[in-house]
């Protein structure tokens, strides 16, 4: 099975940088994904890391270290609209299932 | 890009009745569909995996007779919550394997059982 750990909440001001860490344990790792979810909405895909290193997509970047079973999502130039829950998720190589972490609630203050 | 249309977005039903939730892949074939349940302020918990033309595989602790899943075509999967009770009130989300990012999520269904 899989287990993922990430902080429960983070608060920051507009324009700041936030890093959300995620550590995982899995029997068949295939990749680490990040999703954003606003209240009442469905998860939306942000980033994916299949190999070690940094992936940059606009203001959001994601990092993976497979040897450390660790990744992070970096949110730069925070905006009020970034207030949401962020989930890391690992994909199992055998059955394509996505297992989600508990989620990190990011609150952006003016 | 790939789209999964999920309906209804919100439903209120009386205790003891059944509710059907539909997920349709609009521009791709969804051979595999995942069904999740999410309680407020919690994570997405996988309930079951359905493959077109096969019986669904349920996660441990999920009652297959209560949550009926049908995946009769490559574009449609349904989840029926039978004999719903207030504790079944939750946010249900489908996700199809496929699309630009590997998985395409539906918009979710907010079920309230009164």
Image (cartoon, coloured by chain):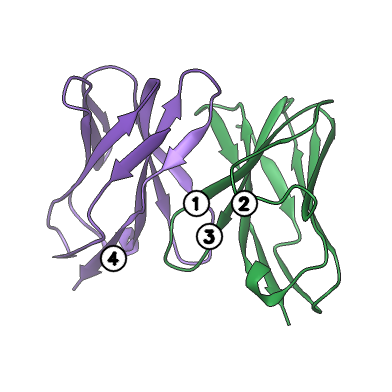
Chain colours: A purple, B green
Q: Label 2, on which residue? A: B93
Instruction: State which tag comes first along the sequence, 1 or 2.
Output: 1
Q: Residues within 10 Å of mark 3 (few under 14, many from 20)?
A: some
Question: Marks 3 and 4: in contact by CB < 8 Å?
Answer: no
Question: Marks 3 and 2: in contact by CB < 8 Å?
Answer: no
Q: Label 4, on which residue? A: A80
Asked which secondary structure carries label 3, the reply is: loop
Asked which secondary structure carries label 1, the reply is: loop
Q: How far apart are marks 4 and 3 (CA)?
A: 17 Å
Confirm whether residue B107 shows in the render.
Answer: no
Disc 4 versus disc 2: nearer the observer: 2
Instruction: Specify the farthest residue to the bottom.
Output: B114
Q: Is residue A11 above or below residue B97?
A: below
Question: Marks 1 and 3: in contact by CB < 8 Å?
Answer: no
Quarter holding residue B28? top right
Q: Label 1, on which residue? A: B44
Q: Residue A19 vs residue B67: left or right?
A: left
Q: Distance between the residues labelled 4 and 2?
A: 26 Å
Q: In this view, does B108 lie above or below B17?
A: above
Q: Label 3, on which residue? A: A41
Q: Residue B56 vs residue A70: left or right?
A: right
The quarter in which the N terminus of chain A is drawn is top left
């Amino acid at each position: 099975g899989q287990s993922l750990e990430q902080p429960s909440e983070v608060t920051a001001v507009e324009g700041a940088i936030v890093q959300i860490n995620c550590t995982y344990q899995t029997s068949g790792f295939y990749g680490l994904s990040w999703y954003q979810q606003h209240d009442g909405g469905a998860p939306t895909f942000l980033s994916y890391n299949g190999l070690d290193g940094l992936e940059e997509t606009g203001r959001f970047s994601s990092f993976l270290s497979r040897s450390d079973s660790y990744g992070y999502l970096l949110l730069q130039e925070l905006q009020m609209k970034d207030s949401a829950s962020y989930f890391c998720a690992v994909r199992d190589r055998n059955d394509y299932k996505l297992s989600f972490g508990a989620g990190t609630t990011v609150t952006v203050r003016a | 890009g790939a789209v999964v249309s999920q309906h209804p977005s919100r439903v209120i039903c009386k205790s003891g009745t059944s509710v059907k939730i539909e997920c349709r892949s609009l521009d791709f074939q969804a051979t595999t569909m995942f069904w999740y349940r999410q309680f407020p302020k919690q994570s997405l918990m996988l309930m079951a995996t359905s493959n077109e033309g096969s019986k669904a595989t349920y996660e441990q602790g999920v009652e297959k007779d209560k949550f009926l899943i049908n995946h009769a075509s490559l574009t449609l999967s349904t989840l029926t919550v039978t004999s719903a009770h207030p504790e079944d009130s939750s946010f249900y989300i489908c996700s199809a394997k496929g699309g630009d990012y590997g998985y395409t999520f539906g918009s979710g269904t907010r079920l309230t059982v009164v």
